[in-house]
Image: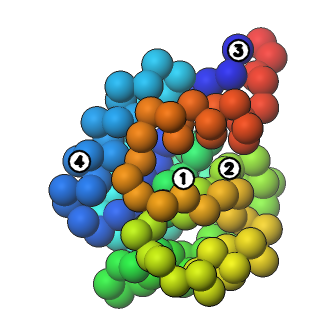
Amino acid sequence: MKSVTSTLLIDDDKFTSFYNEKIVKKHNKFGEIISLNSAKSALEYLEEAIAGKALKPDVIFLDINMPAMNGWEFIEAYKELDTKFTDDIKIIMLTTSSNPKDKERSQTLNEITDYINKPLSLAILDNIIEDLIPCKTS
């Protein structure tokens, strides 16, 4: 049975975060949701998860355009984390960016699994479950 135990949402826009959280909660194949409003706090959260003090996310939805540290800068810092921890995490860029260079750039980075335009929907979540999440064997 394919499912996502934990999802990390990273978006600086409060309304978008609220909306994304509601959509993910509605989907029956997604479990815990952690919603953070900055890339820096997300990196801190991942450090806690590496230390065993927080739940490791299976999927990260990452906004590109954020103040202080944008999605691209997050990816650069993410690359420095322990790869034994990060190898099976799926990072999905979730953005309003209409810049084709952003999509092209995302396709050159191994850390990014997919690039999706906002808004998030149940259909998009179905596709993620179907296409990106391996079956978990008990």
Disc 2: CA contacts within 10 A as few (<14), some (14-19) or many (>=20): some
Tell me the element at label 2. Answer: loop
Residue 59, compared with residue 112, is above or below; it is above
Which one is in front, 107 or 89? 107
Which mark sits nearer the N-terminus, 4 or 2? Answer: 4
Q: Which mark is residue 18?
A: 4
Residue in the image at 42% along x and 40% along y:
121
Is the Cβ of the residue at disc 1 closer than 8 Å to that at disc 2?
A: yes
Residue under circle 2?
Answer: 89
Is the Cβ of the residue at disc 4 closer than 8 Å to that at disc 2?
A: no
Count of marks, rendered view? 4
Residue in the image at 68% along x and 64% along y:
112
Residue 122, compared with residue 2, is above or below; it is below
Tell me the element at label 1. Answer: strand
Which mark sits nearer the N-terminus, 4 or 1? Answer: 4
Colour setting: rainbow
What's the residue type where badge 1 is placed? Ile
Which mark sits nearer the N-terminus, 1 or 3? Answer: 3
Disc 1: CA contacts within 10 A as few (<14), some (14-19) or many (>=20): many
Residue 20: give x, y in percent of width and height: 33, 46
Asked if one can make out residue 102 in the rendered structure from this viewpoint, the answer is: yes
What's the residue type where badge 3 is placed? Met
Residue under circle 3?
Answer: 1
Q: Say left or right for 20 vs 1.
A: left
